[in-house]
């Protein structure tokens, strides 16, 4: 707890303001912490849903309004050659109130980057038929106009070395497939938040 | 045949994968995911089959990798295992064994298709309005 947060509580600040301030100090929501523990095998998503229910920012039946306000105006690009994964990613982002564009291969992304397009976050598959995620990542990090652009890599691999290589190549995060929608949403929001959103 | 949540045989479709979709996006998301999977997987299998016929291990490896990912998302775990085996065979250049493995993947997909079509039909009956796919 920081002194600033303590002071806000003492003044009776609304919960939304407290949450915003806490997140800006690097604190995390209960759900994010719980999802990390699930990723470590210390709990599971069903248990998180049972304990937290709708109380911690994730309402299964309704679009996430907190996410919507947080992520408004953001440009997110999803790149995957698998229409099933793209469909799930786009549906998941839409439920979080995040508008996203999609591409089915890295090749058009390279063209759009070369034309000067920018996104607040790029989520790219690693293995694609023509141009893969490693090349997309390399193009983003290699150009002065996009080198700071956040990139999350989707991978079907559970290979430790490839994950290390991705992070060393400049990926901000990686998400293993199959996609778990609540975890995916949390990681995307965290990336957008770290990027200033 | 043992059946469980969603009426699926857990040896073919892991029901928790379907449940995850329903809990997050409702029946509409489940239905649209099934439709996309049933439309796309045959195209990937055809690519794998063509690759095996042409003894193009790279094409088989790519198709198997993509299928593994889709099958995993839909809980078709035996199909995932077969695709992983095919991907591994192709990566090692064992071309003589690829056609048989692709045939196994195709047969397992047909079993998964049967299960998922039933889930889809049930979802249409119980929640016809939530058809977003």
Image: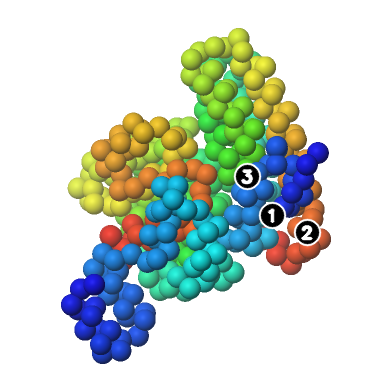
Assign a secondary structure to mark 3. loop
Pointer 2 residue: B124
The percent position of residue A160, horizontal first and vertical second, equals 36, 34
Are discs 1 and 2 less than 8 Å apart at CB?
Answer: yes
Is A141 drawn above or below residue B94 in the view shown?
Answer: below
Quarter of the picture holding the C terminus of chain A: bottom left
At a point 67% along the width and 48% down the height, the residue shown is B15
Assign a secondary structure to mark 1. helix
Residue at mark 2: chain:
B
Q: Quadrant of residue B12?
A: top right
Say left or right for B129 vs A33.
right
Say left or right for B45 vs B122.
left
Say left or right for A120 vs A97.
left
Query: Mark 3 Cα within 10 Å, few/some/many (few <14, many 20+)?
Result: many
Q: Residue furthest front?
A: A42
At a point 34% along the width and 47% down the height, the residue shown is A173
Pointer 3 residue: B74
Residue B59 at least partly seen: no
Residue A189 at least partly seen: yes
Is A196 drawn above or below residue A2 in the view shown?
Answer: above
Who comes first in sequence, dot 2 or dot 3? Answer: 3
Pointer 1 residue: B31
Which of pointers 2 and 3 indicates the residue nearer the eye?
3
Q: Residue furthest top?
A: B96
Q: Quadrant of residue B74?
A: top right
Q: Nearer the viewer, residue A177 or A38?
A: A38
Is B112 drawn above or below residue A72 in the view shown?
Answer: above
Assign a secondary structure to mark 2. helix
Q: Please, which colouring scheme is shown? A: rainbow
Q: Nearer the viewer, residue B35 or A165?
A: A165
């Amino acid at each position: 707890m920081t002194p600033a947060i303590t002071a806000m509580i003492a003044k009776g600040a609304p919960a939304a303001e407290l949450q915003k301030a806490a997140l800006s100090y690097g604190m995390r929501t209960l759900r994010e912490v719980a999802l990390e523990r699930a990723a470590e095998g210390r709990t599971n998503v069903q248990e998180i849903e049972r304990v937290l229910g709708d109380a911690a920012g994730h309402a299964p039946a309704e679009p996430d309004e907190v996410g919507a306000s947080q992520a408004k105006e953001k440009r997110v690009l999803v790149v995957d050659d698998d229409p099933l994964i793209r469909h799930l990613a786009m549906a998941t982002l839409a439920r979080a109130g995040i508008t996203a564009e999609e591409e089915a291969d890295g090749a058009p992304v390279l063209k759009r980057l070369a034309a000067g397009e920018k996104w607040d976050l790029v989520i790219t598959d690693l293995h694609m038929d023509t141009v893969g995620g490693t090349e997309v990542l390399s193009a983003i990090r290699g150009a002065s106009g996009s080198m700071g652009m956040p990139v999350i890599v989707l991978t079907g691999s559970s290979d430790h070395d490839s994950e290390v290589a991705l992070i060393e190549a400049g990926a901000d995060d990686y998400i293993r497939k199959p996609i778990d929608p609540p975890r995916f949403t949390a990681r995307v929001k965290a990336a957008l938040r770290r990027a200033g959103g | 045949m043992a059946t469980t949540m969603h009426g699926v045989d857990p040896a073919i479709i892991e029901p928790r994968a379907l449940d995850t979709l329903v809990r997050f996006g409702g029946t509409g998301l489940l239905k649209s995911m099934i439709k996309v999977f049933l439309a796309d997987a045959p195209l990937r299998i055809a690519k794998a089959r063509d690759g095996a016929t042409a003894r193009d291990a790279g094409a088989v490896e790519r198709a198997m990798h993509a299928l593994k990912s889709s099958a995993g998302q839909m809980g078709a775990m035996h199909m995932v295992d077969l695709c992983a085996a095919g991907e591994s065979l192709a990566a090692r250049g064992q071309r003589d064994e690829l056609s048989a493995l692709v045939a196994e993947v195709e047969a397992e997909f047909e079993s998964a298709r049967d299960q998922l079509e039933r889930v889809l039909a049930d979802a249409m009956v119980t929640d016809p309005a939530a058809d977003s796919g």
